[in-house]
Amino acid sequence: MIIAVNTRLNKETQPEGYEEFLFELLGHVARKFPQHQFIYIFDAPYKNIVFPENVKPVVAGPKASNSLRLQYWFNYRIPAILRKYKSDVFVSIEGICSLRTKFPQCLLLSDLSFLTHPHLLKKSQARFYTKFTPAFLANAKSIATVSSFSKSLIANRYKINADEIAVINPVIDAIFTPLDWEAQEIIKEKYAEGKAYFLCSGNSNLINLLKAFTFFKKRQKSNMLLLITGKTDETFKKEFKTYKLRNEVKLLEGLDKAELAKITASAYAIVYPVLYDDIALPALQALQCNVPVVMSDTGALPSVFGEAALYVNPESYEDIAQKMMLVFKDEDKANELVKAGNELLQQYQPGKTADLLMQCILKCAN
């Protein structure tokens, strides 16, 4: 079977870690089912991606940089590629279907912020998804999402039988693993002046995080640092230049995955106060490293993480700070979070996840 997959990456509308979620998931599926040929379709040149042998990458511009180009790409470029490579099924892991093809389509919705937090998107993006999602769902032969919360939201909002919607858990790279004390000390010396630190591997709600860190430092009088990984926008960087505690905050951009894994495993705790994210891959990576998690109480996150996290109102810097202080002061609570995280991760088995996605693909093709 020839399986074509949309792998275009629009980081403006996709949650933190989405790119990694996408390629880890697809990689496991391709490797577990080598009897099938996969066509990865990009709308722009890619880099630093190693493909399994049964994957053929195809770049098909123009880059879908706005809603009109997006419609052109899905409704004209995608059908042409499906015909050219004689595809049996099209998989879109972005919540968008082609409305101008008869090829069977498997649709994965990983971000429903346009329904629950439309203010976080550009107005044109929110309008696009609000207008076309009913048609995308109607054109899909099989549907999947990333959490039971999202499954219920889709079923109730669009009057779809919940039994017809599969839940696909993220795949967590095995490189995220606990480090021994000596290895952690080396990382602290390299990135945190030898000091303990909170880690944030996210790029949203950072101003509130800085306010929370200030509150924490005033109350605790500790030498704890804050490390922020990933690309930050110019607005944040401008604000950061005037931040009084900027010497106790490290901005780390351009890290490779191996280094990020070590920094994650050496953190005292991860703080993930995002305004919206149904995947929360950085938090899952932290749990796999036996690192406690403080995270937002929004969307699917409480139902997904259960007892494995301390929850905060991301709009309240005081609440974020209070939970940072709790995990800092209460070692027993931190250990409870790690134990609950280990239990939660039993659900995140790459082989099982690959099987679930392939079941959706086969259902679609048949």
Image (cartoon, rainbow, N blue to C red):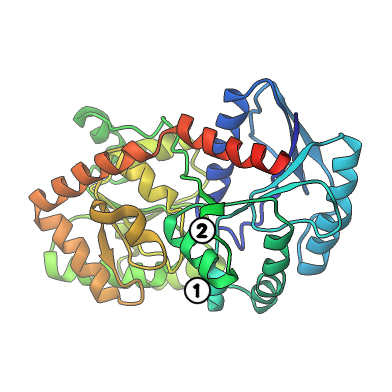
Pinpoint residue 229: horizontal percent, then vertical percent: 43, 51
Residue at (49%, 42%) from the top-left corner? 255
Pinpoint residue 43: horizontal percent, then vertical percent: 78, 49
Q: Which mark is residue 116?
A: 1
Residue 241 visible within the image: no
Could you tell me the amino acid type at mark 2? Ala
Could you tell me the amino acid type at mark 1? Thr
Pinpoint residue 167: horizontal percent, then vertical percent: 49, 49
Q: Which mark is residue 226?
A: none
Frontmost residue, 360 versus 131: 360
Please state which of the two labelled residues, at mark 1 or mark 2, is closer to the viewer. Answer: 2
Helix, strand or loop for disc 1: helix
Frontmost residue, 21 versus 187: 21
Pinpoint residue 306: horizontal percent, then vertical percent: 28, 55
Residue at (20%, 49%) from the top-left corner? 337
Residue at (36%, 72%) from the top-left corner? 208
Residue at (44%, 38%) from the top-left corner? 172
Frontmost residue, 30 versus 12: 30
Sooner in the amino-acid sequence: mark 1 or mark 2: 1
Q: Residues within 10 Å of mark 1 (few under 14, many from 20)?
A: few
Image height of 64 relative to 81, above or below: below
Tag 1–tag 2 contact (CB < 8 Å): no
Q: Read off the residue under disc 2.
A: 162
Structural distance between the alpha carbons of marks 1 and 2: 19 Å
Q: Judge left or right: residue 112 versus residue 269.
A: right
